């Protein structure tokens, strides 16, 4: 009986799960709607760079976040960096959501121009930001992380794009983009 199970399992693995592209996120022939053969990382980075320049986005530093919290402001805050694949795919959707709600998004870039991560215990400015949001994050502020602050308190957070999406492997499909948009709207409208 055990041998039959192993043979069936091997058959399923060998023939039932046809790989579309080893380097892409679709690993079965079921519901693989995303055409990743033309996934151009440079184009996606270019879209990120252009999107972040929109007037909806306001670049601030770690210290500015502390000041906004101390002033008990209500605002939306994104932690990001330009080579993050999730950030690259999230940003255009976030731009549309923020325009639809007429809400500015403040953002902190967590890597410097040389792509060195600024999220470490030696960076007092980062540590201060982590202390502000630590109730909503685990051991680090991962990106993209979009927070809604009300009266200086973080009340909601959205990480990544959508569940089960690996941005290193594939672009989001239209259904995932719509779900992501809905989740971002809900976060920005949180009270």
Image: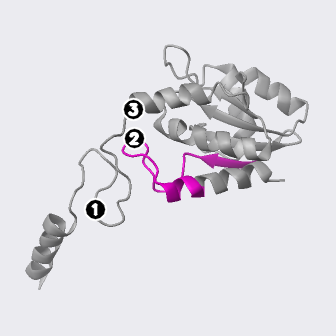
User: Alpha carbon of mark 1 to alpha carbon of mark 2: how far?
Assistant: 17 Å
User: Which residue is at a point 72% across and 55% down the rendered structure image?
Assistant: 186
State the extent of the magenta-drawn residues as a range.
155-179
Q: Which mark is residue 28?
A: 1
Which type of secondary structure does the marked residue at label 3 adopt?
A: helix
Marker disc for residue 116: none
Residue bearing the label numbered 2: 168
Work out whether 30 lies above or below 158. Answer: below
Q: Is residue 150 magenta?
A: no
Relative to 141, 17 lies left or right: left
Vertical position of residue 137 compared to residue 69: above or below: below
Say few, some or many: other residues with alpha carbon within 10 Å of mark 3 (under 14 / 14 to 19 / 20 or more): few
> Which quadrant would the N terminus be assigned to in this image?
bottom left
Q: Give how far across and how far down residue 145 sits, in percent.
A: 62, 40
From this viewpoint, is residue 154 visible? no
Of the image marks 1 and 3, the number of the one nearer the N terminus: 1
Crowd band around label 2 with a 10 angstrom C-alpha radius: few (<14), some (14–19), many (20+): few
Q: Which residue is mark 3?
A: 41
Q: Residue at x 10, y 81 (%)?
A: 4
């Amino acid at each position: 009986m055990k041998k039959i199970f192993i043979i069936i399992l091997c058959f399923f693995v060998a023939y039932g799960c046809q790989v579309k592209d080893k380097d892409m996120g679709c690993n079965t022939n079921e519901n693989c709607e995303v055409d990743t053969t033309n996934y151009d990382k440079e184009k996606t980075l270019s879209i990120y760079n252009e999107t972040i320049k929109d007037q909806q986005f306001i670049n601030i530093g770690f210290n500015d976040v502390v000041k906004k919290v101390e002033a008990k402001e209500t605002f939306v805050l994104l932690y990001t960096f330009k080579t993050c694949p999730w950030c690259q795919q999230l940003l255009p959707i976030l731009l549309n959501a923020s325009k639809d709600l007429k809400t500015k998004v403040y953002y902190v870039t967590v890597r410097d121009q040389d792509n060195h991560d600024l999220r470490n215990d030696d960076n007092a400015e980062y540590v201060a930001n982590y202390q502000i949001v630590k109730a909503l994050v685990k051991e680090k502020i991962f990106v993209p992380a979009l927070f809604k602050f009300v009266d200086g308190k973080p009340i909601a957070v959205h990480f990544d794009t959508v569940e089960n999406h690996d941005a290193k492997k594939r672009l989001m499909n239209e259904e995932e983009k719509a779900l992501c948009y809905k989740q971002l709207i809900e976060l920005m409208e949180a009270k």
